[in-house]
Image (cartoon, helix red, strand yellow):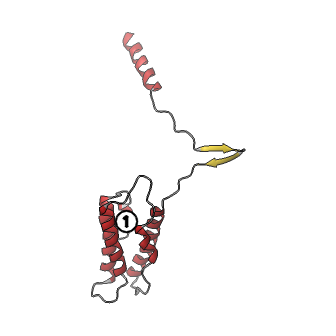
């Protein structure tokens, strides 16, 4: 009986020490509801745009279309876009972002013997190289951009 009582006491204390549920992010002001909504950083938005752009490039290259477009100048914002609050530009980031821009510009170069597929994969591999050192979360998604 003492063992059962002891177990109940332990369970009671454990249940009291559990973390509280997260507070609602809802704030009521003047009778109107306001929600605390996630706002992506400029860098996150830029990278999502780069992903979409490169996904289209991949489709064009796989379809055998000739690349007639130009390097998107918005990609240069990689050097100045505001990062997430917990992130900052490291030397690795600066190095790989510069190499990525060079590789991305090279995709549109007509003065090369390298195939469009190889030039494209070089640019995507620069993304992977950086993300292996800085922000590993998107690596599986980035790998989907590679042309096999």
Query: Quadrant of residue 103 in the image?
Result: bottom left
Residue found 35% across the figure and 61% down from its top: 139
Residue 144 can be seen in this image: yes
In this picture, is 40 found above or below 112?
Answer: above
Q: Which of 17 and 88 is in front in this view?
A: 88
Query: Quadrant of residue 106 in the image?
Result: bottom left
Residue that numbered label 1 is attached to:
142
Q: Is residue 63 left or right of residue 34?
A: left
Residue found 34% across the figure and 57% down from its top: 136
Residue found 36% across the figure and 60% down from its top: 89
Furthest residue toward right: 31
Residue 148 can be seen in this image: no
The spot of residue 64 in percent (x, y) is 39, 85
Q: In this view, does 30 lie to the left or right of 114?
A: right
The spot of residue 72 in percent (x, y) is 44, 78
Q: In this view, does 99 lie to the left or right of 65?
A: left
In this picture, is 32 found above or below 125?
Answer: above
Q: Is mark 1 on a helix, strand or loop?
A: helix
Residue found 30% across the figure and 79% down from its top: 118
Marks counted in the figure total 1
The spot of residue 29 in percent (x, y) is 68, 44
Furthest residue toward bottom: 111
Query: Quadrant of residue 57 in the image?
Result: bottom left
Q: Nearer the viewer, residue 49 or 102?
A: 102
In this picture, is 28 found above or below 66?
Answer: above
In this picture, is 32 found above or below 49?
Answer: above
The spot of residue 93 in percent (x, y) is 33, 63
């Amino acid at each position: 009986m003492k063992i059962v009582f002891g177990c109940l006491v332990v369970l009671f204390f454990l249940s009291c020490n559990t973390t509280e549920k997260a507070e609602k992010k809802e704030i009521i002001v003047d009778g109107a509801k306001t929600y605390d909504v996630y706002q992506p950083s400029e860098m996150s938005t830029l990278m999502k745009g780069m992903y979409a752009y490169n996904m289209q490039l991949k489709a064009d290259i796989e379809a055998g279309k000739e690349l007639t477009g130009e390097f998107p100048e918005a990609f240069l914002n990689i050097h100045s876009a505001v990062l997430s609050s917990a992130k900052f530009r490291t030397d690795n980031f600066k190095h790989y972002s510069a190499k990525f821009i060079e590789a991305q510009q090279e995709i549109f170069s007509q003065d090369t013997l390298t195939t469009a597929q190889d030039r494209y994969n070089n640019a995507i591999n620069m993304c992977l190289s950086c993300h292996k050192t800085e922000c590993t979360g998107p690596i599986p998604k980035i790998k989907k951009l590679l042309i096999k």
